Image (cartoon, grey):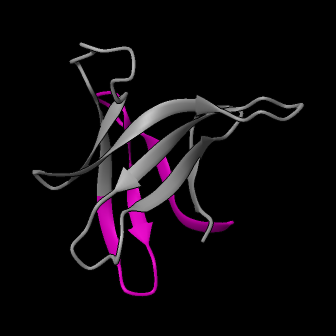
């Protein structure tokens, strides 16, 4: 897996950090979703400035360690298809790594 960014908890809830690829180095925010009208509602909206460019759902790994993480789907016109990535918080919860596997 490739690390695409490091995030930290936001003062207003959620996460903030940068998405870094070969052609992108932009700040993103994960803003908590207050509308949980369905069981499958996203936990966060992925924001680039004022624009919502994706969503994130709570998930957990299915190995012996069973870690919680956020599964992100990011849409951008420059992508051939939506990017699926995962945000894994460190054990202390003070930072998180945005990971992507091709």
Question: In the rendered structure, which segment of residues is drawn in magenta?
Answer: 1-27
Extreme residue in the bottom direction: 22
Picture quarter with the C terminus: bottom right
Against 41, is 101 above or below? below
Q: Is residue 35 left or right of residue 74?
A: left
Q: Is residue 100 left or right of residue 46?
A: right
Seen at 39% across and 22% down, the residue is 40
Q: Nearer the viewer, residue 42 or 12?
A: 42
Extreme residue in the right direction: 64
Query: Is residue 75 within the magenta segment?
Result: no
Seen at 40% across and 39% down, the residue is 56
Q: Is residue 91 left or right of residue 8?
A: right
Provide residue 49's location: percent of width, then percent of height. 15, 56
- How many marks the image carries: the answer is 0
Q: Nearer the viewer, residue 40 or 71?
A: 40
Provide residue 82's location: percent of width, then percent of height. 36, 63
- Magenta highlight: main SS: strand
Provide residue 64's location: percent of width, then percent of height. 89, 31
Provide residue 38's location: percent of width, then percent of height. 30, 15
Seen at 55% across and 49% down, the residue is 86
Against 97, is 4 above or below? below
Against 26, is 66 above or below? above
Query: Is residue 9 within the magenta segment?
Result: yes
Seen at 71% across and 33% down, the residue is 91
């Amino acid at each position: 897996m490739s690390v695409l960014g490091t995030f930290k908890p936001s003062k207003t809830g959620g996460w903030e950090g940068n998405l870094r690829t070969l052609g992108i180095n932009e700040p993103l925010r994960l803003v908590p979703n207050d509308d949980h009208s369905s069981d499958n509602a996203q936990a966060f909206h992925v924001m680039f400035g004022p624009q919502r460019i994706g969503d994130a759902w709570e998930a957990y790994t299915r190995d012996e360690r069973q870690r919680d993480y956020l599964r992100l789907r990011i849409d951008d016109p420059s992508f051939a298809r939506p990017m699926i990535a995962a945000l894994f918080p460190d054990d202390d919860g003070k930072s998180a790594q945005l990971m992507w596997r091709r």
